[in-house]
Image: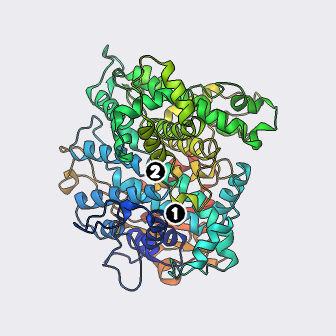
Amino acid sequence: MKNENNVKQVLFEYVKNPKTWFYWYHNPKRLEALFKEDHKTEDDYKEDTECHFTKNVWRFEESKNVVGNIKIEKNLVDFFDAVLDEVRLKKANLFAEYALYISDNEDLAYFRDTVARREISADIDYDRQRDHAVHTLYNYIFGWYIFENSDKLQQAFRDHFKKLKIHLEPNDDHLRFYRSIEIKFCEININSREFKESISLVNEFAEVWSIASLLHDIGYILEGNLSSASPEVENVRVSNGSKIIHDYFNHWFWKSFEVDFRVAKDITKTLGVVVPDFRYSRSLASLGDHLCDIGSCENIRRELSNNMEYKQFNGSSYKTIQEDHGLNREAFSIWKEHYKFYRNKKMQNILYIVERVYKDTVWIGADHGNRNLDHGVCSGLITLQALTFFHELVWGFKRLKWDSFNDEQKKDKSCNYVSHEIFEHISDKVVRVPKRMKIKGGFYSDLWFKKVLWATASAAIHSVIQKPEYREKCKKHLRKKEKTEEKKPLKIGRDDDPLAFLGVLVDVLQEWDRYKVLKLKRGESAFSGAVPLQSTDVVVGLINCDSIHYKVLRELAFTGSELMQRTEVEIDLILSDIIYLVYQGDEKDLFEELRKKLDRCLEKWRDIVLVIGKAEEDM
């Protein structure tokens, strides 16, 4: 009989617990109430009297399969209840779209779906490829679980938001909405000090975490290898991936806004917005370079330069924003500018190494002699391109109103002129800020510089930092402080960058319920080799660092079964210093490999999580 504290059961209880912030943030009733506030005065929201057709309707359902008055999105319940991989995959992507919807990024679920299609059809070169749709959703949920239950990690995020000058005081409209509405969205007292002090922290965390976790593997649409000895420059699978990216910017993006893509392309040209074009990016190197090209970012820069936070200073860190076309640079340079601006030298250096590994892998090869595009870096680059494109459009429309736009378009003889009506229609669609975003601060000018750059850089870092090539580059490029000092690879500490830290942490730990993608490999373990790790083989729980159990656990002088019997594990809104995981699968060396990998990538990760193996449980 499997332990009731297995990770699947514990996380399922966690997402259903109305005392948690996860429950509040994802409550479909909360989002539906905000949706109604958005659309109640619009004609599209009203039912047609003749055919009873409503164009604009709330499209997310709450589950009917949960006991009690628990409001949870249907696809999340179905995800945990699923017993077939296909069902679990489908529900994972549907709930991920819902989670991205909350932060107004649901159109980016397009990339998750395309990765899933490639994997389900086994259109993959790498013979050890595993599922990523379920993996990334587990990352997302487990990251929330750790965030809510680790006071040290929460404090690291509070401190980092303070460095970014992101204020965690909720505005009056935000509090007024939740205090005036009759529906309760959780069992956290909305009039309490805790609610006021935490609501903004939760919103800010959720916005960056959804990007850094749910989108951190979308780069697998560009999966494909070339031998280092091959004269070939193109891989068919990689080329197909570039077409997927091209279709997003030139067709899917406009479809999601329900606007005419032909006219929209002419509008973007006049607004000075670069529409990414991947039609001819077929070679590995060409695609690698095009991914780093995110356009001029001049509309964003102009808006930032008018922000008093950046306008009143004259230091070198501000030149990127104050000088005309200062943001017209490739992605790695802009990521490093973000960390430079906030005086984070260590993360600048880490990004420098990540960039070197990324480019060397394209040109020279790694991973047993293969040239390829690192999926993590590509994930960060694709997401950065997509969000930069949107922000450029928004600030382009805000900069050029109709009269100015019309004057500009008349200067371009090659342009297909856009009418006033269509311009206003598309402008309204793009710049409109939904209530779920407006209530927590809206679409402010430095959101891109503070949060988009941070979250996409975190996604880009997560894969390379786990590779041996990263450690080799560190040894080669880092200077010694003293001749006798050993060159050690740069690791991420939670105070260096809590988002990147958490991203790597959960990515390494999430090893359960991951099936192999290739048809020839799928099912092999039923006949030979080790049995894959299931969620029922991983025990997870909370333990307070002041307890005697923690001290015994820290010294590994215990049996896992004894700990489970003696320690009451609750999923509650009580901060616990340590989350522990016990890996009980047949692969006896797995937990030790996880520890070693975390030791290579992260500093002081054991202050947040303890990883225990079956061998230690049997001591």
Residue lying at 44% horizontally and 55% vertically, measured from the top left? 100
Mark 1 lies on residue: 144
Q: Quadrant of residue 533?
A: bottom left
Mark 2 lies on residue: 105
Could you tell which of marks 2 and 1 lies nearer the N-terminus?
2
Location of residue 616 with respect to 252 vertically, above or below: below
Whether tag 2 and tag 1 are in contact, CB under 8 A, the answer is no
Between 29 and 133, the one lying in front of the other is: 29
Tell me: 80 left or right of 402.
Answer: left
In x, y percent, where is residue 417?
41, 27
Using a 10 Å C-alpha cutoff, classify the residue at mark 2 as few (fewer than 14 neighbours), some (14 to 19) or many (20 or more). Answer: some
Using a 10 Å C-alpha cutoff, classify the residue at mark 1 as few (fewer than 14 neighbours), some (14 to 19) or many (20 or more). Answer: many
In x, y percent, where is residue 24?
51, 72
Amino acid tagged 1: Trp
Residue 109 appears in the figure: yes
Tell me: 308 left or right of 135.
Answer: right
> Rounded to the nearest whole Å, what is the CA distance between mark 2 and mark 1?
18 Å
**Mark closer to the observer (2, 1):** 2
Helix or strand or loop: what does disc 1 sit on? helix
